[in-house]
Each structure stands twice: as C-alpha cells, then as structure tokens.
Image (cartoon, helix red, strand yellow):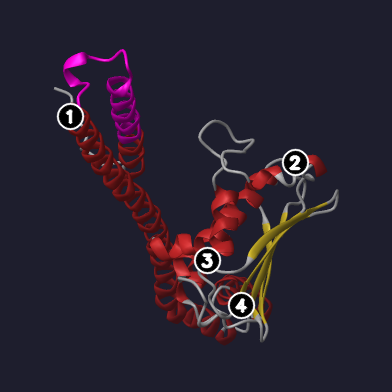
Amino acid sequence: MRAQKPLTLNLHKAALYAIVINALQIAAAVALAALILMEDANPSLRGPVGNIIVITLALVVSWGAIMDIREAIRARKIGFKLQGLDETVAQMTDLNHALRAQRHDFLNHLQVVYSLIEMEEYQEANRYIEQVYGDIQQVSQALKTRCAPVNALLRAKMAEAEQRGVRVESSVHAAWDPLPLPAWEMCRVLSNLIDNALDAMAETENPTLYITLAEDVKGFSFEVKNNGPAIPAEKQSAIFEAGVSGKGEGRGMGLFIARETLRHAGGDLTVESTDAFTAFRGRVPRSLKITDERKDA
C-alpha cells in the first residue's frame, strides 16, 4: 500500500485562485445586470422593482468578491513574508550549527597543536594551525555586522559557494544595525542576488564572488559582484521585470522582488555588467520611506 503524501497548503496558489474566481464572479454579476437592464431583457424584470433587485444583487455579489480579493492579496503578502522568515530561520540554524561545531572542536585543536609542539614537530604544527585558521576566518568574515540574520545568510552562502567551487571575497565594514526594513527582507534581497551570481558562474573558469556591505550617514549599501558572463546591454533593464528569467518556466521573480523590496523602503537596485564583471548594487536610506502599498500590507 502506497503511503499518502501529507496535505500541504500552497498559500500563494490558493490566493491566486481566489483572486481569479472572484474576478470572474464580479464580471458575471456586472454582465448579468447589464443584460437585464437592456431593452431586450426579460420583460418581467424590466420594471423599477426588478431593476432595483437586480442591481442590489449585483452590488452584493460584487462587494463580497471585492472583499475576498482583498483578503486573498493580503494572504499572498503574508505568504511571502512567511517564506522569507523560514529562509532566515534556516540560515540562522546553519550559522548556529557552525558556531557550535567550532566551539566543540576548539579544545581538540588545542590538544593537537600542543602535542605537536611538545614533540617538536614545529612545521607540522604550523601547517595544522594554518588549516584551522582558514576555517575560523571563514566564519569570522560572516560575523562582522550586528545583524544576526545577515550574518547567518552570509555564513550559509559562503559555505554553499565553497561547495560549488566558488571563491568568495567579502568586505564588510558596517554594523547594519538598525536596518530601515525588516532584516528578513534584506536577507531575501541578498539571497536572491547571491544565488543568481552563483548560477551565473556555473561555467566560469576561476569563479569569484565579491560581497561588499557598507553604510554612511545617509544609508546602507551593498554590492554583489561576480566574474561570470556579461548580461547583454539590451536585457539589463528587462531582468528586473516579473517573470523574466533564463532559468526556465516559473522563474524570474527574484530580481523583481529584490528591487521592489528596496524601492518600498525608499531605496533602489541597479546593475552594471561588462565582460569583466557583473555587479548588482543596492541602497536604502536610514529613514524608512514606506510606500502606500507597503502601508496596506
């Protein structure tokens, strides 16, 4: 007997279906009212009472559908937020595991180094220390901000880049605290850009990812740069449009979401691409400038 798959709720799909169905319901109600009010409609409903009844029914149905659509849109926004929070929790969990593993191994490393020195194996001790230092430095590079979710994201992405054979050079000279937008939203922006950079360098020789985080008195900025192939000039503006992607059907929302997230906070996201590098640069002001759409979320 085959095991049944657990039931899962796709909040985005359910909300989309609700929007479409209720939009059709509004269209049907309006069409019905228009047909009945026309001169060639049913004579029994042509009088004032019939017209009032029909118009009232159409208004009630339309009002209910509009309310459903509004709630469905809110549900989709909540779904996006929950997905972002899930990603942040997963990244922080990975960081916590890495830190716990390093703490657990620290005494073991000291014992090994002590034994090598005691046996006067100085060159071997030096090589061992260099290897351990490299692992510690990788985690330390991701702990330079005071924003725990951002630290967790950088640690997770550095580990992923290492697994994919990509060298990472990070430059973090910013506390990034407090950010003018929720940390999970900024993590989602960075995550989309880093994932795109790693994918772009799949066929690149000596792939290198450059991550820069900075801030000044006016706001916070970042740059995610890679040495993969250039984005054609005629496509550089289109890549920020919803649904535009070279990764297949159902993709192409990452850059759109990233730019819209920054714009809702009063910032922006730009791209520069040449034969030498492709760089995405983002910035948000220190004072949060929320758009009307974000207020309704």
Task: Report how many numbered discs are placed on residues in the image.
Answer: 4
Q: Say which residue label 1 marks.
A: 3
Q: Residue furthest front?
A: 47
Q: Say whether residue 214 is left or right of residue 61.
A: right
Residue 235 numbered mark, or none? 2
- Number of other residues with Cα within 10 Å of mark 3, as a class: few under 14, some 14 to 19, many 20 or more: some
Q: Say which residue label 4 marks.
A: 129
Residue plotted at (51% across, 78% down) = 112
Q: Which residues are magenta?
A: 21-49
Q: Quadrant of the C terminus?
A: bottom left
Mark closer to the chain start, 3 or 2: 3
The reply to whether residue 155 is visible in this rendering is: yes
Residue plotted at (71% across, 58% down) = 270
Say which of 245 and 141 sits in front. 245
Q: Say whether residue 265 is left or right of residue 27.
A: right
Residue type of the residue flagged with mark 3: Met
Q: Quadrant of the N terminus?
A: top left
Mark closer to the chain start, 1 or 4: 1
Question: Quick check: is 80 in the magenta stretch?
Answer: no
Whole-angstrom CA distance, mark 3 to mark 2, is 25 Å
Residue plotted at (45% across, 66% down) = 184
Name the element at disc 3.
helix
Q: Say which residue label 3 marks.
A: 186
Mark closer to the chain start, 1 or 2: 1
